[in-house]
Image (cartoon, grey):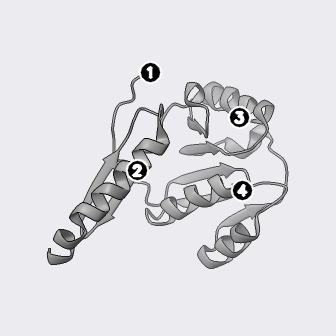
Amino acid sequence: MKFYPISLNLKDKKVVIIGGGKIAERKIKGLVKCDAKITLVSPNLSRNLETIIRKYKIKYFKKKYTSFIIKNQFLIFACTSDNDVNEKIFNDAERLGVLVNVCDDTKKCRFIVPAVIRKKGIVISISTDGKRPALSKKFKEVLKNEFGNLWDKL
């Protein structure tokens, strides 16, 4: 599967994240930088997520997934550890025509999120089309280390 690289303006766009663990944390940290209107839905949260939702004033619903949650959303991230729930989120999103990313299951993604370096107006995105995310992350670290001093001079 090949994905088309694109950068989205998410300012004031509704984005819902379903799940309460480390992957949801990472998604929120990236989305807040883009001024998205983030809603988090999960019956349980990691301790870090509790802090993050307070810090960034994320709208949070302490409940299990229902299809009503994704109506009128621009993007959906399914970040649960339950494959059946992720499958339902994917199917509901497809039915509603909403872009969905089922974290850790590229076959159920209508978009993927690359590894990103963002500094002083320069954005570099690194992707392996979802096949080897650890390699994307490694390339990101190499580039940050290699060009770190150059960016500081800009």
Residues under labels 3 and 2: Cα distance? 30 Å
Determine whether label 1 and label 2 are within 8 Å by CB: no
Q: Position of residue 76 (x, y in %)?
A: 60, 43
Residue visible at 50% across and 59% down? 31
Q: Residues within 10 Å of mark 4 (few under 14, many from 20)?
A: some
Q: Nearer the viewer, mark 1 or mark 3?
A: 1
Residue visible at 64% across and 68% down? 58
> In this rendering, is residue 141 above or below 69?
below
Check disc 3 and give the amino acid type.
Ile
Along the viewing direction, whichever of 99 and 152 lies nearer the viewer: 152
Q: Quadrant of residue 38?
A: bottom right
Dot 4 or dot 2: first in sequence order is 4
Give SS at disc 2.
helix
Q: Which residue is label 4 attached to?
A: 21
Q: Residues within 10 Å of mark 2 (few under 14, many from 20)?
A: few
Dot 1 or dot 4: first in sequence order is 1
Residues under labels 1 and 3: Cα distance? 20 Å
Residues under labels 1 and 2: Cα distance? 22 Å
Residues under labels 3 and 4: Cα distance? 17 Å
Residues under labels 1 and 4: Cα distance? 27 Å
Q: Which residue is label 1 attached to?
A: 1
Give SS at disc 3.
helix
Q: Which residue is label 2 attached to?
A: 138
Q: Nearer the viewer, mark 3 or mark 4?
A: 4
Q: Quadrant of the C terminus?
A: bottom left
Give SS at disc 1.
loop
Q: Quadrant of the N terminus?
A: top left
Q: Position of residue 26 (x, y in %)?
A: 57, 58
> In this rendering, is residue 59 above or below 67?
below
